[in-house]
Structures are given as C-alpha cells and as structure tokens.
Amino acid sequence: MKIEDMSIIDFALHVADYLYNNGIEVVLSGGSCVTIYTKNKYISCDLDFVLISHIVPKKIKETLERIGFQEKGKYFKHKKSQYLIDFLSPPLSLGEEPVKEISKIRKGNKVLMLLSPTDCVKDRLAAYYHWNDEQSFDQALMVYKENQVDLGEVERWSLNEGMEDKFKVFKESLPY
Amino acid sequence: MLEPLFESDKKEKILLYLYTKGESYPNEIARIFNLYINTVYNQLLKLEKGGVLYSKLKGKVRLFGINPRYPFRKELEALLKKTLRFLSEEEKEKFFKPRLRPRRTGKPF
C-alpha cells in the first residue's frame, strides 16, 4: 500500500513496526487513539508516539529519514502523507501513574502498541482535568460510548489525581 | 544547589522561577537572571521536550510552566520547595518573590 493511501491505523502500524525493527519501541497515545477507537468520528492527523525508553533524537531522525520522513520543527512528516509524527519522552504515564497494560492492534505481521480504551479515556480526561479542555472531555465521552471502558478504574485514577469534582461532571454526562 | 542533579545552574533557576511564578516567558526569565535569551529558550525547549514543562501561546508570547501532567511533578515541586528554603532571604526577595498584584498602566515601577 502506498503511504498516501494509508488510513491512520495503517500509517501508525507502518511507522511503529519500522521503528521497532530499528530498535525504537513506541506506544501510540493522544488524539490519534481517539480516532482509532471512535472509527474516525473524531479525526486527528497528529500521531503522538511515546518512547518506551530514552532514544537519542539523532537516531530517530536518521531512522525516519531513511524512509522519506523529514523533521519539521518538533514534528516529522512524509511529503506524501497528511499525518504528523511527534515523539514524547518516556515514561509512558497517565498523570501520576505509569501505564500498566498496553493494547495491541495486529495486521499481518505488523503490531501497533497503543493505549487501551480505558487509558485513552484517562488520557483525554487528564487534558480536561488540567487544562479545562472541553474538546478532550468530548473525546473521552466518544471513546467511552464506542468501547468497553472500565469506569471504576477511571474513577479510581481520577480520585488519585485529586479530580473528584471533575470526574463527577464526566460521570453525569455518560449515557448510562 | 541542584546543579549536580540538573547539571546546570540555569536550569535550576528557570525551574525555581516557574515554580514560584506559575508561568513565565523566555524574555522575562532572561531579564530577571541576566541570562542570554537563547540560553533560556534552549533550556525551556529541552525541559518541554522532556515533558517537564508545557508551553502555550498567549497573544504573541509563548508562556512556559511546570507541566501538571508530568508524572514526577509532585516530587519535582517538593524538591524545588525545599531548595527555596536553602536560599538567602536576599536571593528569595530578588528572584523568587515576584510581584503578582496588578499595577495600573503608566505607573512607574
């Protein structure tokens, strides 16, 4: 498949698998997980990859340049693709806590590691909790509606973050 | 004081300033500590890249602050809080007790 024809999942699989084969392990987080879990009801073209371990930026740059990506400021972009790639420093965390379980999407012999739906909801809620970002709140709701999300775990995490009141707002917005 | 950890007294000053002030921009930090703006900006970018700081645009100014989503934020802030206790009163007054109340336009500082 040509890079310009790739869906966000195919693109993320393509990049993550290539990076893995070159010694760079990443987990997809952020808005692109929302796109995947809502089957494109929310569209993000930014792929935020969290590095599993510290990698020298030069290595990432050289590795991606070999398959046609160019560094543009903080991002990497392929001239034939609309998607932007950003790398976030380890550790993979949600607020104060490390991420314990990572979901995987397999296609052929390629594997994409990404936040689970429950952690994706936490990730979006973290943006709402700390930045009052209403868009992230809406995204958390969208992921919740379309996936199996452990609400008890989201509540436990929210209380640990000291966000009881804002979690209550979220809980009251849920459809059931 | 934290140079052995941060390997830079500039980084320590920047973090202490952001901890006490909440948010600031490169020009202000450079002016307060008499540092080159590029030095300050590069340190801010490194800290942002590492997830320690966030930045946001306000008008044409990029403001930086300690990232509330940084997993070690509480521990970092505890360290900075303790560091402030070891500074002289003079240093604290000069650098880390910024005026937060408003001042009417036109009044001399």
Image (cartoon, coloured by chain):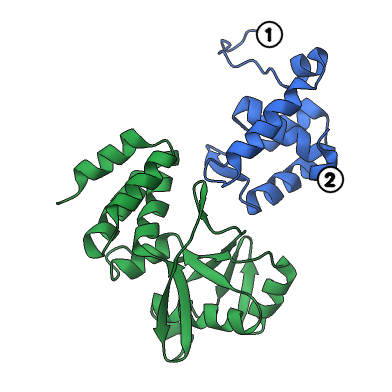
Nearer the observer, A8 or A141: A141
B55 vs B6, nearest the viewer: B6
Can marks 2 and 1 be said to lie on one chain? Answer: yes
Q: Residue at x 57, y 42 (%)?
A: B67
- Dot 2: what SS? loop
Apparent colour of chain B: blue
Picture coordinates of residue B42, whole percent (x, y): 75, 48
Q: Residue at x 60, y 79 (%)?
A: A19
10 Å crowding of disc 1: few (<14), some (14-19), many (20+) = few
Q: Please tell me which of labels 2 and 1 falls first in the chain.
A: 2
Q: Nearer the viewer, mark 2 or mark 1?
A: 2
Work out whether residue B63 can be spotted.
Answer: no
Tell me the residue at 47%/73% (across/down).
A113
Report which colour depicts chain A: green
Q: Is residue A36 left or right of residue B108?
A: left
Numbered circle sitting on residue A123 = none
Chain of the residue that carries numbered disc 1 in the rendered image: B
CA gap between label 2 and label 1 equals: 38 Å
Q: Residues within 10 Å of mark 2 (few under 14, many from 20)?
A: few
In the rendered image, the quadrant that contains the N terminus of chain A is: bottom left
What residue is shown at x 20% (from left), y 45% (from top)?
A173
From the top left corner, tell me how far across and down residue B12 is, in percent: 77, 36
Please state which amino acid type lies under the numbered disc 1.
Pro
Q: How many marks?
A: 2
- Residue A38 relative to residue B31: left or right: left
Q: Quadrant of residue A73?
A: bottom right
Q: Disc 2 residue type?
A: Glu
Give the number of the disc on residue B108: 1
Where is mark 2, residue-wise? B7
Q: Position of residue B56 (x, y in %)?
A: 54, 42
